[in-house]
Amino acid sequence: MVAFTHLAIALSTVAGSLAAPAADPYVDAPDFELNGDRLMRRQDYNQDYKTSGNVNFSPTNNGYSVSFSGAGDFVVGKGWRTGTTRNITFDGSTTASAGTVLVSVYGWTTNPLIEYYVQEYTSNGAGSAQGQKLGTVTCDGSVYDIWKHQQVNQPSIQGTATFWQYISNRQSKRPGSGTVTTKCHFDAWNALGLNLGSHNYQTLSTEGWGNAGGNSKYTISGS
Ligand SMILES: *[C@@H]1O[C@H](CO)[C@@H](O)[C@H](O)[C@H]1NC(C)=O
C-alpha cells in the first residue's frame, strides 16, 4: 500500500498535446472504428507514469506490453482519453515475480475528483483496496468487493489534492482475459453513494510497487 503516488499523468501532458499534438508521446491521434454497426472511438490514450526502477512500457495501437524490475511505483496502460460506460475487453497475460502487481480498468473523473479501479488481477489479494469496505457486487461472473479510500494531499490529474478512490476488487482473479462491464460497477458504486463526476481518461493498466518485478502484455477493445 505504497502507491499513494499513483497516477499523475496530469494535465501537463494534455496541455502539451495541445501545443504539439504530433510530438506528444502519450496521446495518439484521435481515431474511430466500426464495431458492429457503431462507430467507436479507438484507443487514443497511453498512460505512462513511473517513479523508480526499471519499467519498459511499449504501447501499441490496441494494447501494450510492459516488463519491470525493482519498480518503486508505476501505472502504465492503454485506453481512451474520455471514459464512458463502455464494456472493456482485454486479452493477454501478467506475471508477477516480486512486489505488488495489479491489472485494472482504471480512470479518473472530475467534479468530484475520483480515481477508480476495477481490479481484475492482484498479486497479493488486495492490490490497492484499502480504507473502508462498503459491500459487494456481482459483475461479469464474479463477486467484487467494493472499497472507498481517501487520498490526502496525493498526486492527481489536478495536481496534489485530497480525493476519494473507488475500488472494485475481483474475488476471482483473472490475469488473462475478460470483459469488464463498467456500468455494472458504476451503478453499484452509485447505489452505495459513491458518485462519479465528469469522465477523464479510462484505461486498462498494469500497476506495480514495492520493488515490483514481472511483465504484462494485453490487447484491449471497447464496445
Ligand atoms: C455491455 O454489456 C452489457 C452486458 O453484457 C450489454 O447489455 C450492453 O449492451 C453492452 N454495452 C455495449 C455498449 O456494448
Image (cartoon, rainbow, N blue to C red):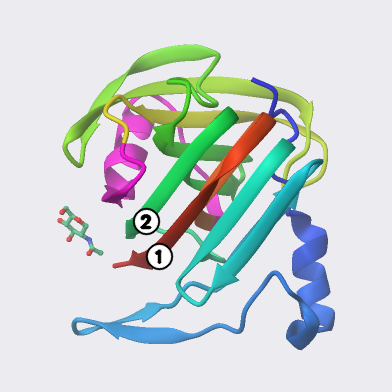
| Magenta stretch holds residue 125 | no
The quadrant the N terminus occupies is: top right
- Local SS, label 2: strand
Look at discs 2 and 1 and give the one toward the viewer.
2
Residue 137 left/right relative to 24: left
Question: Which of 167/175 is in front?
Answer: 175
Question: Which of 10/55 is in front?
Answer: 55
Q: Which residue is mark 1?
A: 219
Residue 33 rendering spot, x and y as whole percentages: 36, 85
The span shown in magenta is 174-201
Q: Amino acid at mark 2?
A: Gly
Whether residue 107 is visible here, answered yes or no, is yes
User: In the image, is residue 137 above or below residue 186?
Assistant: above
- Local SS, label 1: strand
Circle on res. 92 = 2
Residue drawn 36% across the image and 41% down it:
186
Whether residue 78 is visible here, answered yes or no, is no
The quadrant the C terminus occupies is: bottom left
Q: Are marks 2 and 1 in contact (CB under 8 Å)?
A: yes
Circle on res. 42 = none
Q: How many marks?
A: 2
Q: Amino acid at mark 1?
A: Thr
Residue 145 left/right relative to 197: left
